Image: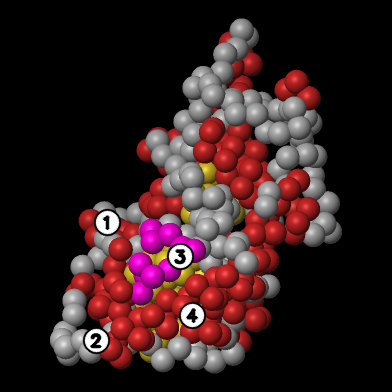
Amino acid sequence: MNNKKTLDAKVGAGTRVVWGGEQVSHPYNATQTPIVASAAYGYDDIDTWYDVALGNQPGFIYSRMSNPTVAVLEDKLCALEAAESAVAFSSGMAAISGVLHSLLACGQRVVSTRDSYGGTNKIFEEFLPRMGVEVTLCDTYDTEAIEREIARGCNVVYLETPTNPTLKVLDIRRLVAAAKRVGALVVADNTFATPLNQNPLALGVDVVVHSATKFLSGHGDVLGGIACGAETLMSKVRHYREINGAALDPFSAYLIIRGIKTLALRLRQQQASAQALAEYLCTEPLVEAVNYPGLAEHPGHAIARAQMRGFGAIVSFVLKGGMRDVAQLLPLLKYAHRAGNLGAVETIYGPARTTSHVENTLEERQALGISEGLVRISVGIEDTADLLADLRDACTVLRERQRTQPQCTAVHA
């Protein structure tokens, strides 16, 4: 693959997801990015081989280090996030852990928030302390407390916004300013927002990470992760990936590339349905709380409007009856998977204890402020009216059951 061209900076999101990273000449004049399933790449000339290995000439040596199909995906994310460089990983968690381990060392300090994704929280609570990194986790909505901890001195500030699964929104510009005052790098997980709704690099963030398994892929059939940023930082991240081995395979890269091309279309429908479902849930008697940045009463609504172009396709809500109601409501839904993924074309429902925070104990989830009655909806591309009717019908059946078959009062885990 060669003759790479730069995408016009003025083109819209729908054009960018299709053509970003793909204005190249493919072998055999193929119109689609080929899957290059080769572990190694041969050279007759030893000097050329050596120059490519050192990075002095373009080319490929070994697919754990770089691969032509994966390189197209990385270029596409650079186009979407306006990044200088990108590194693809075998999963979203591989990208997150790879970035954190690349940028942090023994004796250093990271500041983040308590209710990030459960896997990320495990890195902070379990793995980084083992390597001598001091970790401070703050209340997500106590921005002043986060700023105070940053001001004490740190090396990395890690942000996830909106958060998974509570949909809290962090003020990226404000926290970036606090980090820069102490010379800290800022890393942001942009999975929920996607590059179409939010570009953290444009807000001052140093490294953006995505679970490409989710909205980028969009079809629930592949794992992948991406980190984007300046080449000075990405070279460290790339070196870590090369040595530790969490490289993305070319077939997965191809599937993610293909999925990204419909991201703008998918997200448009998903967000419209998410807003409708969130508004309905606010009126549902079974529901105690609704989390969606598109609601005017959401605590982060104003910040979301300022730094996002859309409010995303994830809604979460808390059922008053806790896990008892969750266990009864979810099987009543006709147009939904009950599974631990998100961002797919099909709608997916799931409680935090079996999805985002399955790695955490009940006590850990309670400490993180995650109710056992919390349900996350990853809204798909189905017709809005059908999704709305499905949820409304399920809630109606559950309410009728409770009216005719009263439940004993009990404490449910």
Type of the residue with mark 3: Lys
Circle 2 residue:
405
Front-most of residues 378 and 45: 378
**Mark number displayed over residue 127:** 1
Residue 148 drawn at (x, y percent): 41, 83
Taking the spot 59% from the left edge, 78% from the top edge, the residue there is: 275
Front-most of residues 317 and 200: 317
Within the image, what quadrant is residue 255 found in? top right
Q: What element carries label 3?
A: loop
Query: Which circle's residue, 1 or 4, is located before the other in the chain?
Result: 1
Type of the residue with mark 1: Phe
Taking the spot 60% from the left edge, 29% from the top edge, the residue there is: 35
3D distance between C-alphas at marks 3 and 4: 11 Å
Q: In this view, does 166 lie above or below 218?
A: below
Examine the rendering and report whether any part of residue 187 can be seen.
no
**Mark number displayed over residue 152:** none
Taking the spot 37% from the left edge, 38% from the top edge, the residue there is: 244
Type of the residue with mark 2: Gln
The residue positioned farthest toward the front in the image shown: 404
Circle 3 residue:
334
Q: What stretch is highlighted in magenta?
A: 329-339
Q: Are marks 2 and 3 in contact (CB under 8 Å)?
A: no
